[in-house]
Amino acid sequence: MARRSLRVADVVEVLEHWAAGRPLRAIAESLGLDRHTVRKYVTPARESGFGPGAGPPPEGWAAFVARVCPELGRARKNGAAWDELASRHDEIAERLKVNRPSTVWVSRCAATIHRPATRPRSIMDGSASGPIRRPAKR
């Protein structure tokens, strides 16, 4: 199964199914999760005294999940690339206002768009009368 990020709403859904009395394996299958992931989020609720038939916590499952699993509510930084983007936030915002694409993008697109179209020559149809030349890269 592929790794994916869960949101608070996803964990709340797991806990609602569990509080309704569904087995962990059935919850995992119906929500497309691994049963160990389901167990990971059910364990804090079980340790806090909640369970099937006991009902949700007084503050609700969403507040419970936010309190017990605070990492679900935070955006995760993705290393050096995230820091680089954050340092260039003002520059990116200014470029988007002007709607000016970067010069690298313009030069790459111009090279591919304005390249003359050539018909591939083939030995089979007799149109190749000499060495096959490829268009020059610009």
Image (cartoon, rainbow, N blue to C red):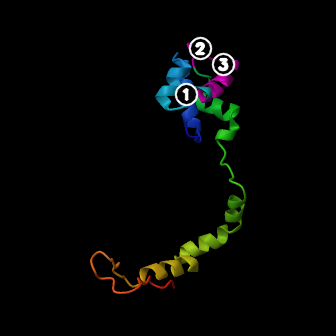
Indicate the quadrant where residue 5 lies: top right
- Dot 1 or dot 3, earlier in sequence: 1
Identity of the amino acid at label 3? Arg
Q: Alpha-carbon distance for marks 3 and 2?
A: 10 Å
Q: Which residues are magenta?
A: 37-55
Picture coordinates of residue 30, whole percent (x, y):
47, 27
Picture coordinates of residue 130, whole percent (x, y):
38, 86
In terms of secondary structure, where does tag 1 sit?
Answer: helix
Tell me if label 3 and label 2 are in contact, CB under 8 Å: no
| Mark whose residue sits in front, 3 or 2 | 3
Indicate the quadrant where residue 80 lies: bottom right
Give the quarter of the figure containing the N terminus.
top right
Give the crowd class for mark 3: few <14, some 14-19, many >=20 residues within 10 Å: some
Query: Which disc, if any, is residue 54?
Result: 2
Q: Which residue is mark 1?
A: 14
| Mark whose residue sits in front, 1 or 2 | 1
Query: Which disc, if any, is residue 46?
Result: 3
Picture coordinates of residue 7, whole percent (x, y):
58, 39
Query: Which disc, if any, is residue 113?
Result: none
Visible residue check, residue 102: no
- Dot 3 or dot 2, earlier in sequence: 3
- Dot 1 or dot 2, earlier in sequence: 1
Asked if residue 66 is among those painted magenta in the image, a careful observer would answer no
Identity of the amino acid at label 2? Ala
Q: Residue at x 44, y 84 (%)?
A: 135
Q: Is residue 52 above or below residue 136?
A: above
Q: Residue at x 66, y 19 (%)?
A: 46
In terms of secondary structure, where does tag 3 sit?
Answer: helix
Indicate the quadrant where residue 94 lies: bottom right
